[in-house]
Image: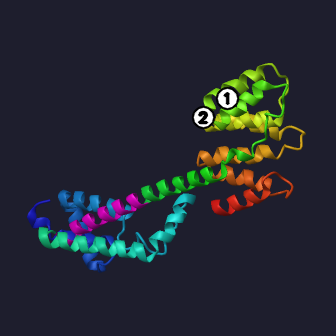
Amino acid sequence: MDANQEKYHDQIDAYLRDELSTEDRALFEQLLEKNPEVLKEFKIHQELFVHIDESSWIDDSFTPEIEEVKKVENYFKSIEAKRLKDTIVKAQANYQKKNNTSFLNNRLFLSVLAAASIAIFVVLYTMNSNNADQDLYAAYSQWQDLPSLTSRSDESQLAEGQRLFEQKKYDESYMLFKEYKKDKNKLLPSVLIYLGVSALELDQYTEAISYFDQIISSDTIDQSKGYWYKALVYLKQDKKDDVIKVLEIILKDRQNYNFDKAQALLKKMQ
């Protein structure tokens, strides 16, 4: 669009905001039909207007559909977000003053800044959210409470596996427990726990889940322990919905393993 057509920018903006009179609106539509350059510019700003509207990017009508984004909504309505918008507006005013460009072009500049600010916040929020889940995993994956295998004097292989595990030599302990498993038709829940937790520490999540599911499907008194450790697998993977589902199963019975911890963790996850 050449310099003589810059005056149409304000008309484009007024048209998109439905601020023109009926007569002016009709005249502007005639202009669009006759001037392909103006029409091209109009379509660009129409697309921008649909996706990024300065008047509503932070107001109460912001209703995200994705669960994670709903949490960001409170920030957008907060004092901090409004201050951010004011800062962007000031930057836009300075830009307009220095560059002497039209109002709508500067609306484009403002909208891009606003969109960039939102994108930056969402990225930071997502990173912080994931970090928070990892902090929870670190807090609840304390393995001091694992059952002892050293009392089984007839199974020195198990005692050695526990020793390696406690030294955080998870590769070695996992291989040793898997070797032990080959010769057994059925494993005790305590051994399955070590197998599962070793796999978990090695980020072998499918294997870890399989061992904990074996505990869950058993008819032993340790059955509910499988749910707790399975929840930790999902927690380490930042699978919040899956963590919550498993915790809710634990909370159906106060006698289930780590009932109180499950209750506390669920509150922190919600």
Q: CA distance from mark 1 to mark 2?
A: 9 Å
- Bounds of the magenta segment: 102-121
Tell me, yes or no, whether the two marked residues, 1 and 2, touch with CB atoms within 8 Å: yes
Image vertical order of residue 124 relative to residue 61, above or below: above
Count of marks placed on residues: 2
Give the side of residue 152 with respect to residue 131, left or right.
right
Look at the image and tell me in which quarter the N terminus lies.
bottom left
| Residue at (39, 58) in percent of width and height | 119
Earlier along the polypeptide chain: callout 1 or callout 2? Answer: 1
Is 34 or 60 nearer to us in this picture? 60
Is 216 or 161 nearer to us in this picture? 161
Q: Secondary structure at mark 2?
A: loop
- The quadrant in which residue 244 appears is bottom right
Asked whether residue 228 appears in the rendered view, the answer is yes
Give the side of residue 148 with respect to residue 137, left or right.
right
- The quadrant in which residue 225 appears is top right
* Picture coordinates of residue 149, whole percent (x, y): 79, 34
Q: Main secondary structure of the magenta part?
A: helix
Residue hosting label 1: 174
Asked whether residue 270 appears in the rendered view, the answer is no
Residue 212 forms part of the magenta stretch = no
Label number found at residue 116: none
Label number found at residue 202: 2
* Picture coordinates of residue 74, whole percent (x, y): 51, 71
The amino acid marked with disc number 1 is Tyr
Is 173 or 55 nearer to us in this picture? 173
The amino acid marked with disc number 2 is Leu
* Picture coordinates of residue 59, whole percent (x, y): 44, 74
Q: Residues within 10 Å of mark 2 (few under 14, many from 20)?
A: few
